[in-house]
Amino acid sequence: MTDVKIAVTSGEKRLQNRILSISTPRAYDETAYHLPVSYALTGLAVHDRATAQEAYARSGNNTIVAAECLLSEQFAIGGKEHAPYTGFIGDTVLRKLGYSLVDGSILGLALVIGTPDNAGLAAGICRELQEKYMLTFLSGGVVPALSGTGVKLGLEYRLIPLGSTNTHGIHFADIVARVAMMFGGVTPGDSGRLLKYATERAKAIVIVFSGLSDEDIALVDAMRALGFPIVSLGPYSGDAWITAIPEDAVRVGMEAKGIRVTVTAIPIPMACSPAFEGKSIRKEEMYVEFGGGRSPAFELLRMRRPGEIKDGQITVIGPEIDAMTEGSANPLGIIIEVAGKSMKKDYEPILERRIHNFVNYGEGSWHVAQRDLIWVRISKEAVAKGVRIEHIGKLLAGKFRMDFSALLDAVAVTLITDEKKVLAAKDEAEKVYEERDARIQGMRDEDVDTYYSCTLCQTFAPNHVCVITPERPALCGAISWLDGKIAYEISPAGPNQPVKKGALINAQNGEYEGVNRFVKKTSHGEIDRCSLYSVMEYPMTCCGCFECIALMLPEVNGIMVVNREFKGVTPSGMTFSTLAGTIGGGAQTPGFAGISKNYILSDRFLQGEGGIERLVWMPIQLKDELKNRLQKKLSEQGHADLFEKIADETKAATIEELTTYLAGVDHPALSMKPLV
Amino acid sequence: MAPDIRFDWTGTVGSVVLGATKTEGGTRKISYRIGGGSTLPFLSGNASSPSPLVALEICDTSEYWSPVIRNYCGDLVDDIHAWSQAAETLYGADLVRLYLTSTKERNFSDIVSVKTSIEDVLSATGLPLIIEGSNEPKIDSEVFLKCGEAGEGERLLLGTAEASRYRSIAAAALAYNHSLIAQSPIDINLAKQLNILLREIGVPRDHIVIDPYTGTLGYGFEYSYSAIERIRFSALKGDADLAMPMISSATDTLTVKEVREADPKWQDEIAVQWEFYTGIAAAVAGAEIICVRHPRTIPMLRKAFLDLKTGTAGPAGLT
C-alpha cells in the first residue's frame, strides 16, 4: 500500500526540483491558451524557462503547473507520440467537446489513469462510462491494457487515449481549464474563479489504477483542488481518495460529483402526460380500485442512502392485476425509496405529494388524496392494453427521476397488494406520518427569521405575492412554511424565495420591514406594505386560489369566513364567487383577505383585529370540517363557548338575522373595539 | 421644460452587440449595439431611447414562405445569395434573418448545407445576421453546432431558445461567442424563467435577446403588446433578469385570413399594411428589433420611427 499523503509530499518535492532545472518548456500550437492550466491560474503565457519558473512560483508552487511545464518540455524535445495517442488536444476540437458538454449530449468528463490489474475490468469501466454518456480520457498503462478487450478508442467512441504515461493525465486538467476560459467566462489569472468553475460546473471525475509514481500521485491529488473526486482502484491508502471496487467505480465517482443520467421515456403500455391529470375514471370505466375507504391503502416515500437501493427496481409483493376480480377493491401499499446526494429527509413529504400528480399523469390511472387516505383506480381500457401494477411502479420511478433529476440518483418502487403485508406496512407508515406532523406543529413565527414567498400564481395574478410563515400557510392551503423552505432548496430560482423578515414595524398586525421590501420588489412596485395578520390594514394580496375568504362585516363589528365550496349567498349579500371576483387578481383589498382553512386554526388568525373572537360567521360545512380542531383550539385560548356563538347559514342567512343572532348569544365581537 | 420621462424608473435595458466588423474580428460592414434604453422608445426628453432596427426575414426553402413574397420578390426567393444581397442594397434592411427552413424536412440529414447556406449569406451581405436554426429537437445538437461554427467571429444572433430546448443553442452561443433569442409564449414569468435557465448554463445577460412571441394584429397581438410592455416596465424598474432588448416577429401576418383571402388586386397592399401596423405597435411597446417579410414594409417602418422620434407624428411634434 502506498500512503497517498507521504507520496504527495515526496512527489511535490521532486517536481519542485525538476522545475529548477527545466530548460525548454514551450506553449502548444493549436491553442490560444498557451500552457492552459498555468495560463488560467496565473495569467502568464509560459514559453521558456523563466516564464515557467515564474508561473510555478506565482501559482504557489502548484503541482499541476509544474507537471504541465515539464510535460511541455518533454513534448518540445520528443515531439508528438504515435497513434493512437492524441497528446495535447487543440482548441478547435475542444470547442466541439465543450459544446457537447453544455448541450448535454455528454454528461461529464472522466480521466482513467494508471495500469489496471485486470484488463477485463478496465474494459468494463470504460464501457460503463460510454453508456453513461461520459467523455473519457485515458493515460498510462490502461491504454495498452485495453487493446485486447475489443474496446474501441477515439473521439467518436468518447474514449480518448491522451498518452502513454500517467503524466499525460495533465491534459485532462488543461482541457477543464480551457473549457472554463472558453465557456465559463473565466479570465486568465483569476484562479479563484477557475477553481470555482472547475468545482461547481465541470462535471469531472478521476479513476485511478495501480502503478502511479509519487509524482503521478501528487499530480492526481492536486486535481482534488479542482473539485474532481478521485476514485481509487489501486493500492493507495489515505482518506482523500475514495476507495471502490471496479464494479462500483463509475457509479461512486458520478455520485460523488453529482452527475446524473437522465430518464427521457417511460416504457409502459399507456400514455403518460400532465394532459391526463384532470381526467377521472368513473366506476363503470374502472377495472380495479384501491383504498378510498373500500380497502386498506397507503403511500409512503422514504429516503435511503446511495447504494442501498437499485435505481429503477420495481417490486410487486402480492397478486398482480390478472389475479384480481374485475370491479373489485384491493389493498395497496405504494412505497417509494429514493436516494441522492443532495436529498434530505425533510424533502420526503414534498416528494411524496407528487405521487398524486404522477399517477394521474397515466392515461388509465387515477389517484386522489394522500397518505393512508389514498384512492387509486386503473381503467378497463388500460388493463386491456396490458397495464399491470408493475407499470404504475415504472411510471412513478421514471417520473421521479425525470422531474427531480437534480435531486435523485436512484428511485426504487415497491407495490404491495397482499392484504396482510399492506396492513403491516401501513402501521409503519402511520408512525412516519406522525413524526412528520410533529415537526411543523409547534413551530411559531417568532422562532424563525426567514419566511418564504410564493409567486407561483403570478402567471395570472401578476403582482400577487404570498408570504408564508410557520403559522400562516399559503392562502391556497397547499404550501406550508416548511414546504416553501424545501421548495427553495430544491429549486433556488423557483417561485418560493426566502424573505428575511427584518425589523418589526407593527407586532399586532405582523408588519416587518424586510417583508415590505420583498413584497414591494416582487409585486413590481405595486404593493408598499403587507401585514401578515391583518384583514383590515395592508392585508396580503390575493391571487385566486384561496380556500376561503375572510371579510369584515361592519354592521356586526366582526369578520366572517366563507369557503370555496359554499354556493349560497353569505350575510355580506354576496356569494363566494362574487367575492372572489372582487378581491382576486393580485390586488390588496383592505377588509378582505384570502386565507387557507388551516389558518383559521392558527393563533395568528385575525390577530390584527383582536383575535378569533372577531369570527362571527362560517358556512356550516366548514364549521363541521374544522369542528374538533377548532373547539380544541378555542378551549386552549379560553373561549370554549365561542364555537357555538359563531353563526352559520342555518342560524343567520342575512346581515339582519346575523345581527339579531349575535346579540342573542352575546357574541364577544359586539363589544370589541370598532373595526372601522 | 421637458417632462420627466423616467418616472420612478431606475433600471436600464442591457445592451447586446449584433455583428462584428473587421476590426471586431468579423467581416460585417456594420455592427449594432442594441438596447441601452432607459425609458420607452418614443417618449421625448433627454433619457435615452434608441430607435428599433428592422430585419428582413428570408429562408432557404421558399415553399414555406407566403406567396405574397414570391409574387413581389420573384425568383429572388429561390436564391438566398441574391435575396440577402437585395435585403441590404435594394430593400434597405438593418439586419437579415435567415430561417433554415430546410431543416424542417422530414429526416433532414444534410447538416453540411447548414454551413454552406450561412456562409453564402455571409458572403452576400455585410449586414449582421440572425440565424434561425433547427426546428426539430433531434437535430438541434448538430445544426446549432454548425451554425455556431459557420458564423464564428461574426457575432450572430441565433434563434430560438425555448424553456424546453435551449441547451444546444446556448452551447453554440457560448462556444462561438454569438448571442441568442430566448422565446417564451407571451408570459413575462416564463420569459424571466428562461433567462434564469440561460444564466445558469452560463450565457451572459448581454448575449440574450428576449422574444416575447408576437401574435399578429387581430390574432392576439394585444397579448403580445402587454407582454412586451410588462417586460420593458420590469426592466426599467430594475429587474435585471428581464433587462434585455426584445425582438418581435409576427410570423403569421402574411397568412392571416385578411391577407390570404384579399382581392388579388389589393393583396400586396394589405399584406404590407398588416405587417406595418403590427410592427409599429410592437416598436411602441418597446421591441428593439422588428422583423418583417415584405420588403416594402421596411421603409414605411423606418419613416414612421423617424416621425415618431423627431417629426410631427410623435410627442416631439407637440412641443
Image: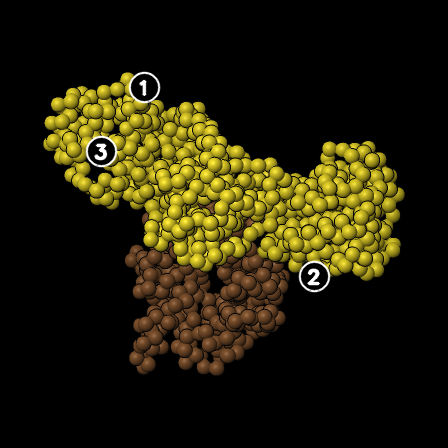
Chain colours: A yellow, B brown
CA gap between label 3 and label 2 equals 70 Å
A623 with respect to B311 (left or right): left
Q: Splitting the image into 4 quarters, where does residue A30 fall?
A: bottom right
Q: Position of residue A152 (x, y in %)?
A: 75, 59
CA gap between label 2 and label 1 equals 72 Å
Evaluate whether label 3 is on the same chain as label 1. yes
A612 with respect to B168 (left or right): left
CA gap between label 3 and label 1 equals 22 Å
**Callout 2, which amino acid?**
Glu
Q: Splitting the image into 4 quarters, where does residue A619 fall?
A: top left
Which comes before the other along the chain, label 2 or label 1?
A: 2
Q: Which residue is mark 1?
A: A636
Q: Which residue corresponds to the image point at 79% horizontal and 37% vertical from the top-left?
A: A236
**Callout 3, which amino acid?**
Ile
* Residue B23 in view: no
Q: Position of residue B167 (x, y in %)?
A: 55, 55
Q: Which residue corresponds to the image point at 80% horizontal and 60% vertical from the top-left?
A: A84
**What chain letter is assigned to the residue under label 2?**
A
